[in-house]
Amino acid sequence: MEERLQKVLASAGVASRREAEKIILAGRVKVNGKLVTELGIKVDPNHCRITVDGNPVKQEKKAYYIFNKPRGIVTTMSDDKGRKCIADFVKDLPERVFAVGRLDYNTEGLLLLTNDGELAQKLMHPSHEVNKTYLVKVPGLCKDEVLDKLRMGVKLEDGMTAPAIVNLRGYDTEGKFTMFDITIHEGRNRQVRRMCDFIGFPVRELKRIKLGPIKLQNLGRGKFRPLYEEELEALLKAAKL
């Protein structure tokens, strides 16, 4: 059965479908020895020899892991600046995996690692509205009525945000900081940080604690584990697969 080349690469765990498109356009992919630099070509992975950077692409068993990203880690599998990245934590895994979406350098918490490019594409596309929940710590006393602005949506430089679900968790006894969680389904760059900047309470600490139905719970920083069967079923349902 023929499929688009970028989908085949994603299914093989090379990268997400979007990143696979970039790999093709960069001239890194050959099919039966012939260089392919255009999107849209269809191939039969069972009858074609596909290579990326000269390395054969093999269909791998699908793998799904939850990873608790620490602060100060780059959400990539390599870094040209020599910074610590996700690959440093999962180098002994039998499968090649990549992160679904990103958390910025100073944000910690839940990341999904997989070689399922189709699932990654669905989860990252805003039309599927898969919720992401973050635990936020901001300095000072941020009253609930101020958080109402986030609940209604705020105007950022790239447009209005969708209304967020915000739950005030409480204040430090001396009013030095406020804790709340926020749930959004959009995936804009540094969105939660920019939303908090808008209301005048810049983020001090940020941690993603939930992705769709998957919760971080008691997984230690820098640790990972396979998804439980019921978690995977719920995630596939949320991604409409």
Image: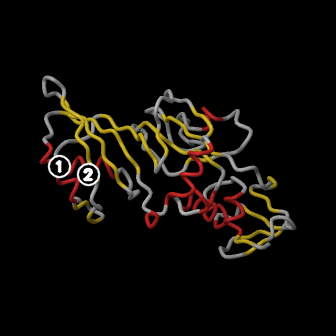
Query: Would you place residue 34 above or below residue 97 in this image?
Result: below
Q: Which residue is mark 1?
A: 199
Q: Circle 1 — which element?
A: loop
Front in this rendered view, residue 218 or 233: 233
- Residue at the spot 18% in from the left edge and 30% down from the top edge: 171
Where residue 64 sits in the image (x, y, percent)?
A: 63, 45
Residue 112 x, y percent position in the rendering: 55, 45
Task: Tell me what residue is drawn at x 15 percent, y 44 percent.
Answer: 144
Disc 2 + disc 1, Cβ < 8 Å: yes
Report, in whole angstroms, how far the alpha carbon at label 2 lies from the one at label 1.
Answer: 7 Å
Q: Quadrant of the C terminus?
A: bottom right
Q: Which mark is residue 121?
A: none
How are the colours assigned in the image? Answer: secondary structure
Which image quadrant for residue 186?
bottom left
Callout 1, which amino acid? Ile
In the image, residue 46 lies at what x, y percent?
A: 85, 64
Q: Amino acid at mark 2?
A: Met
Residue 195 is labelled as 2
**Quarter occupied by residue 78:** top right
Q: Secondary structure at mark 2?
A: helix
Toward which corner of the image does residue 54 lie, by quadrant? bottom right
Depicted 206 relative to depicted 183: above or below:
above
Q: Pointer 2: residues within 10 angstroms few (<14), some, or many (20+)?
A: many
Q: Quadrant of the N terminus?
A: bottom right
> How far across and how far down the image is residue 136, in percent?
30, 39
Left or right position of 45 against 184: right
- What residue is drawn where x is 13% and y is 28%? 175
Other-residue count near label 1 (Cα within 10 Å), few / some / many at <14 / 14–19 / ≥20: some
Q: Is residue 217 left or right of residue 159?
A: right
Q: Residue most toward the front? A: 230
